[in-house]
């Protein structure tokens, strides 16, 4: 996990896969990095898009991760909330509500550290 400066506690399953399948995991990390630099989108926008996709598939861990990464890339909490809220007509209010609570987990933790 070299990209960014976050040192959040990672889920056990994530760490287990990372340790057991090192070559596979490195390939997945490299794919993500290459995809982000393959076009004109800046890092913040890329993470906001990934955050929206994470919300759409109801992945709490990914919402946490991309909220953290979007903040590190310069996104404001309001931008993170907006990236999720605009999904309402596409993924529905209950899913948006869950994603907002997961983003809040990260945003409130960051606020406590200040």
Image (spheres, rainbow, N blue to C red):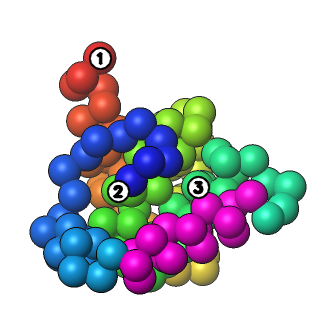
Q: CA distance from mark 3 to mark 2?
A: 11 Å
Label 3 with label 1: CB-CB less than 8 Å: no
Q: Nearest the camera: 95 or 50?
A: 50
Q: Nearest the camera: 20 or 92?
A: 20
Sooner in the amino-acid sequence: mark 3 or mark 1: 3
Q: Nearest the camera: 24 or 61?
A: 24
- Where disc 2 sits, the SS reads helix
Residue matched to label 2: 64
* Residue 56: image location, x then y, percent: 49, 77
* Residue 27: image location, x then y, percent: 50, 76
Q: Is residue 36 magenta?
A: yes
Residue located 25% across and 46% down the image = 8
Mark 1, Cα crowd under 10 Å, few <14 / some 14-19 / many 20+, is few
Sooner in the amino-acid sequence: mark 3 or mark 2: 3
Residue located 46% across and 56% down the image = 66
* Residue 13: image location, x then y, percent: 18, 76
Residue matched to label 3: 47
* Residue 15: image location, x then y, percent: 21, 68
Residue matched to label 1: 114
Label 2 with label 1: CB-CB less than 8 Å: no
Residue located 36% across and 40% down the image = 6
Q: Which residues are magenta?
A: 23-37
- Where disc 3 sits, the SS reads helix
Give the answer, above or below, for where 101 lies relative to 75.
Answer: below
Q: Quadrant of residue 46?
A: bottom right
Mark 3, Cα crowd under 10 Å, few <14 / some 14-19 / many 20+, is many
* Outermost residue toward the right in this view: 40
- Where disc 1 sits, the SS reads loop
> Does 3 sit left or right of 25 as displayed?
right
Q: CA distance from mark 2 to mark 1?
A: 18 Å
How many numbered marks have been drawn onto this rendered protein structure? 3
């Amino acid at each position: 996990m070299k990209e960014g400066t976050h040192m959040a506690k990672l889920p056990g399953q994530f760490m287990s896969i990372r340790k057991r399948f090192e070559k596979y995991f490195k390939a997945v990390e490299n794919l993500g990095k290459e995809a982000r630099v393959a076009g004109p989108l800046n890092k913040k926008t890329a993470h906001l898009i990934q955050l929206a996709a994470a919300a759409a598939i109801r992945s709490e861990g990914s919402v946490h991760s991309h909220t953290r990464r979007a903040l590190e890339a310069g996104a404001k909490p309001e931008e993170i909330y907006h990236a999720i809220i605009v999904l309402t007509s596409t993924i529905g209010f209950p899913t948006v509500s869950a994603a907002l609570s997961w983003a809040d987990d990260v945003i409130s933790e960051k606020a406590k550290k200040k």
